[in-house]
Image (tube, helix red, strand yellow):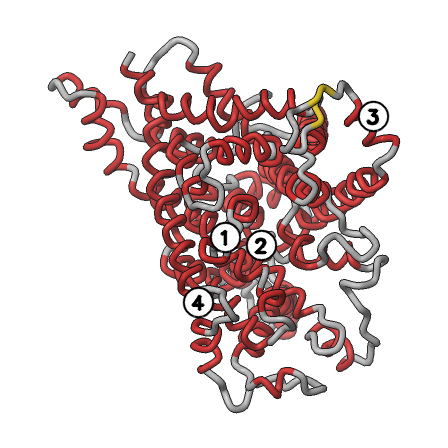
Amino acid sequence: MVAYAFILPWVIGFILFVGGPIVASFVLSFFRWKMIAPPRFYGLTHYINMVTTDELFRTSIWVTFKFVLISVPIGQVLALILALLLNQRIWFLGYWRSAFYLPAVVSGVAGSVIWVWMYHVELGIVNNGLALLGIEGRNWLFDKELVLGSLIVKSLWNIGIPMVIYLAALQGMPQQLYEAADIDGAGEVPKFLSITLPMLSPAIFFNVVMGIIAAVQTFAEPYVMTGGGPDNATLFLGLHLYQNAFHYLKMGYASAMAWIMFLLIFGLTVFQFGLAGRWVYYEGGAR
Amino acid sequence: MVVGNEAVPTGEGLHGEAYTRPSRLRTLLLGNRFQTGLVRLIVIYALLIFSAFLFLLPFYWMVNTALKPPNQVFTLPPTWIPKPVMWSNFLTAFTIQYETDPPVYNYALNTAIVTVNGVVSTIFSSALVAYAFARLEFPGKNVIFLGILSTLMIPFAVVMVPQFIIWRYLNWLDTLWPLMIPHWFGSAWNIFLLRQFFMTIPREYDEAAYLDGASRWNIFIRIILPLSKPALAAVAVFAFVFFWNDFLGPLIILSTPENFTLTLFLANFNVAYRGTPWHLYMAAALIIILPCLILFFFSQNAFLKGITVTDLKG
């Protein structure tokens, strides 16, 4: 009985702010409700509209999907490379690590504002830096071909947390495996492929799953940097949903979209777990 | 540990220096199994310097602009070092007021209230729940714990609309309450993190106290919490960064500038000032991220601990 007293806060919070809202959101997705007139039953119309009439929804799914599929793998590879660099015996490890981690404590809004200024077509450091190298600058945030790439580059600035997880995993690696490989005369590449990567696979798996969950929900960056433009090229699902809910007050439709967002996260996560059996190696047996 | 000397025959009489020198040079440049060679060292540091340059460039560009006199912001090519250095930009950004908007310290106060509440509530409630899962036995424990973990997959968007409706019915929209109250009920990630840490505390400590007649509550307050300071510090610093930087929550709840937090102020900066005084914009951005940067520099270990405390090896 005492135990239930300890978990009571979570139970109350779950009912009020998580479980209750989940049910409400699900029910609401079958209703049309603009907060003025009472809700009206709408059946599957919202879900049908998504695929038939709301072209912006399809755009937003495609934008989000592209962003996740490009930014997460590149970000993970970069985080791993940085962690491998830091794992060499180097001087001032703490300072280097701080330099790469620092952007992770900068808010989405402040980081976005800084990058808007970096990308400024005339006054930004990106174009002026390229000019020093003799390369002509581009309008990074107002060219619909480039803008999603610009946001992906900005997202790569925030890989501090996965990097630290990789570094910790590397530092916890049992040295005798490498010593055994050394005795066998294994080179650097075979050692990396057959020792480092398998031993890191749980960390890679964890980081990829968390990275996907965060990337699907991307909001502050497009809201601050592009407002979804130009020409809806950065209309992320989160942004489209926010606009429908709080600009047009389409609460039912926004709820339906939120469930699609959940399905996207759920699907990608389940897909990862399905693949995990084939490549994730858990020391001390299969799980 | 110069292994090279051992590997090479030292018989000077037979081969002399002509034999050993290229081998030593080779070791020096490329290293052997136990040593980093010079070439490798150069590659490593070149990559480190290049990456650190790219990662710190946005900070440089922000600080550079924040310290420029207004007329220099628009000169081409840009000045790479501000001259004269305008420290007064920070004061201007912090005290400037557009028409009827409140001064910046008003936003800072709101953010501070939300952040302090967030840190205290998250630590207390998550630790309480985590203790039950780490130490107590009760029916349904595993199912409930899995339930807690699975909420990590629920995007905020799913619960956002119903929560908004709740606050609207309570007439609490455009107040700070919706940004403070929900965090007194435990957060899934922190419950998980603290439970993992509590499990590493030897059970003998609390069992001895239990036999002496201490209540579960006293054990929690007097034994578990004091022994968990590093983990609690980790939760605290991450909660601080989260609440200080939170954007979507305040965005949907708050509507009048008097109640805005710093992130809302920053997101609306160029709208409020009709045009963009970039030097003030960057000065404001710098002021806003400064508390998190300072916190990071003084509690790096807590940050690292918070990221790596959960054992990923299953």
Q: Which residue type does callout 3 highlight?
A: Ile
Checking the image for residue A108, the label placed there is 2
Q: Which residue is mark 4?
A: B103
Residue shown at 52%/41% (left/top)?
A: A173
Marks 3 and 2, Cα distance to the nearest angstrom? 33 Å
Would you call the spot at circle 2 few (<14 residues within 10 Å), some (14-19), or many (20 or more)?
Answer: many
Look at the picture and state if A266 lies above or below B104: above
Q: Are marks 4 and 3 in contact (CB under 8 Å)?
A: no
Residue A123: quadrant of the picture: bottom right
Q: Determine the chain carrying the residue at label 1.
A: B
Q: Are marks 2 and 1 in contact (CB under 8 Å)?
A: yes
Element assignment for label 3: helix
Q: Determine the chain carrying the residue at label 2.
A: A
Q: Are marks 4 and 1 on the same chain?
A: yes
Residue shown at 37%/34% (left/top)?
A: B184
Q: Which residue type does callout 1 highlight?
A: Asn
Tell me if residue A193 can be seen: no
Checking the image for residue B245, the label placed there is 1
Q: Residue furthest left?
A: B212
Element assignment for label 4: loop
Would you call the spot at circle 4 few (<14 residues within 10 Å), some (14-19), or many (20 or more)?
Answer: some
Would you call the spot at circle 3 few (<14 residues within 10 Å), some (14-19), or many (20 or more)?
Answer: few
* Residue B240, percent from left and from top: 41, 50
Q: Which residue type does callout 4 highlight?
A: Pro
Q: Which residue type does callout 2 highlight?
A: Gly
